Image (tube, rainbow, N blue to C red):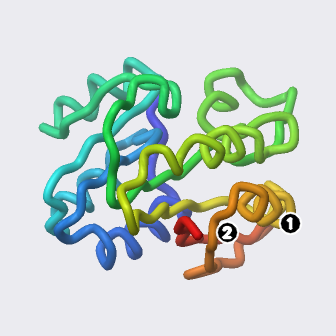
Amino acid sequence: MIYEPDEDSFLLVKQVKKLAKDKKVLDMGTGFGILAETALESGAKDVLAVDIDEEVIEFVKSKGIKVKTSDLFSNIDEKFDLIIFNPPYLPEDELEDFEIRNVTTGGKEGYEIIERFLIDAKKYLNKNGEILIVFSSLTNKEKVDSILNENKYKFKCLETKKMFFEELYVYLIKMH
């Protein structure tokens, strides 16, 4: 199932436009491919989009974007200046359809995929590399902050957006 761009994607698009120029970019969990497209349009020197879903891979490939199948970093063997991630970040909801849950649910508590990503991400960053990520207040912001601190990242919130039932956070993350 291809994740259609929504508020979280559009928040990241604004930041990608500012940060991607002249950078080697990885769009993790590319979904619709909007972030990879934005990076290319913003002058990134190289963009690789990855996703676990074969339907997504074919769709993004049809847009002329360099793409490959990967479960987070499982099929990545290079380093990047900017890694963009719009992860599945909502807590598990048993009533949700499996296909939808697959693109929106970040684990039982919502932060588990973000945690897996952050533990490994530093190995794939060039010196002075950055991570751009979005997540929700439903994910447990304090837990995400704690994971960042445990993994020795420095981070700042670039933007927040209050929604009807949640607040979205866009973080810029760097190594200490």
The residue drawn where x is 51% and y is 25% is: 71
Q: Residues within 10 Å of mark 1 (few under 14, many from 20)?
A: few
**Residue 78's spot in the image, x, y percent?**
31, 38
**Residue 124's spot in the image, x, y percent?**
43, 45
The residue drawn where x is 67% and y is 46% is: 114
Depth check: give the residue in front, 16 or 56: 16
* Residue pointed to by mark 2: 168
Circles 1 and 2: CB distance less than 8 Å? no
Q: In the rendered view, tell whether residue 28 sits above or below residue 41.
A: above
Depth check: give the residue in front, 124 or 88: 124
Q: Quadrant of the C terminus?
A: bottom right
Depth check: give the residue in front, 71 or 3: 71
Figure quadrant of residue 138: bottom right
Q: Decide which of tag 1 and tag 2 comes sooner along the chain.
A: 1
**Relative side of 98 to 2, left or right:** right
Q: What's the amino acid at mark 2?
A: Leu
Q: Residues within 10 Å of mark 2 (few under 14, many from 20)?
A: many
* Residue pointed to by mark 1: 142
Q: What's the amino acid at mark 1?
A: Glu
Q: Which mark is residue 35?
A: none
